[in-house]
Image (cartoon, grey):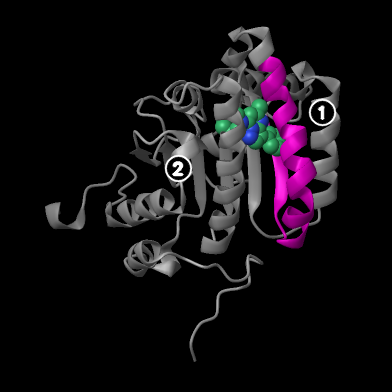
Amino acid sequence: MPCRREKSGAGQMELTPREEEILKEIDRDRIPVHVAMIMDGNGRWARERGLPRSAGHRQGVETVREVVRFSNYLGIKVLTLFAFSTENWRRPLQEIDFLMSLPEQYLQSELPELVRNNVRVKLLGDPERLPEKVRRAIAKGLEATSSNSGMLLNFALNYGARMEIVRAVRAMLRDLQQGKLKETDISEELFAGYLYTAGLPDPDLLIRTGGEFRISNFLLWQLAYSELWFTSVYWPDFGRIHLLQAIRDFQQRERRFGRISPEQR
Ligand code: V07
């Protein structure tokens, strides 16, 4: 019996012949479980068109919509998007204001579809510094999708990996002092449980758009064994075809997690 793929809740999707071509080279049973993305190049995309940076960010949200839909369709279980770093507060105030309007905008238009498609939304990062209206919009999104069991959509917002690690150390020390754990309990697994990503599998694949070859303080602990995929394509131009290429390349790589390959043995 042919295997039908609608369980993820994404339903049908019309693919272009080029997309179909790449999809045929992909093993649908080996889709990366967790994909993380650094969505870079929005400002340059705008500048090259003589547009304000905000136009790049707005177009970037369109890409988020499309990527979320398509990831769900492909059966990715966890999608983690780096939306705003702890370093981004150094940007001009006007740009920050605009960026801070995007979570609400996105959730306002997408929440019904996210709910329908069984997607669960989560925040990675410190909500404390976020404006009240952003916190409220996100709380509503979390609440409305909290019982969903399909794809988990993580937005890293006011996120920095070193800060995440420091925060985890503090929380662990607190538990140590309160006698909830002892020094010999400390292990990689225990420590991972204090991170924002507690309970989630590490990313199998990190995609960075925009032509830079850096990790930029994103998921430092969690990316230890991830496959990294870089493209010069700007985030607003990133599309289904690129995600398909990334997954195809991912499947052609040999993941060893520090072991030697069998033919070397
Ligand atoms: C932002 C669009 C994508 C390109 C990168 C910068 C601009 C979606 C969100 C978002 C965040 C939280 C949430 C729902 C949506 C977002 C910011 C910037 C700050 F719960 N896109 N996007 N947030 N950009």
SS class, disc 1: helix
**Pointer 1 residue Cβ closer than 8 Å to ligand 1:** no
Q: Is residue 261 or residue 15 the one in the foreground?
A: 15
Query: Measuring 60% from the left and 7% from the top, which residue is drawn there?
Result: 90
Q: Is residue 246 above or below residue 139?
A: below
Q: Position of residue 223 (x, y in %)?
A: 45, 35
Q: Identify the residue shown where x is 85% and y is 45%.
A: 143
Residue 226 location, quadrant: top left
Q: Where the C terminus falls, by quadrant? A: bottom left
Residue 135 - label: 1
* Three-letter residue code for mark 1: Arg
From the image, tell me which residue sits under label 2: 238
Horizontal side of residue 29 vs 70, given as left or right: left
Q: Which residues are magenta?
A: 96-124
Front one among 202 and 213: 213
Mark 2 Cβ and ligand 1 under 8 Å apart: no
Q: Which residue is farthest front?
A: 50
Q: Residues within 10 Å of mark 2 (few under 14, many from 20)?
A: many
| Residue 239 higher or lower than 124, as above or below | below
Magenta residue check for 245: no
Q: Nearer the viewer, residue 109 or 204?
A: 109
Q: What residue is at 57 percent from the left and 13 percent from the top?
A: 87
Image depth: mark 1 or mark 2 in front: 2
**Residue in the image at 50% along x and 22% along y:** 43
Q: Position of residue 5 (x, y in %)?
A: 56, 74
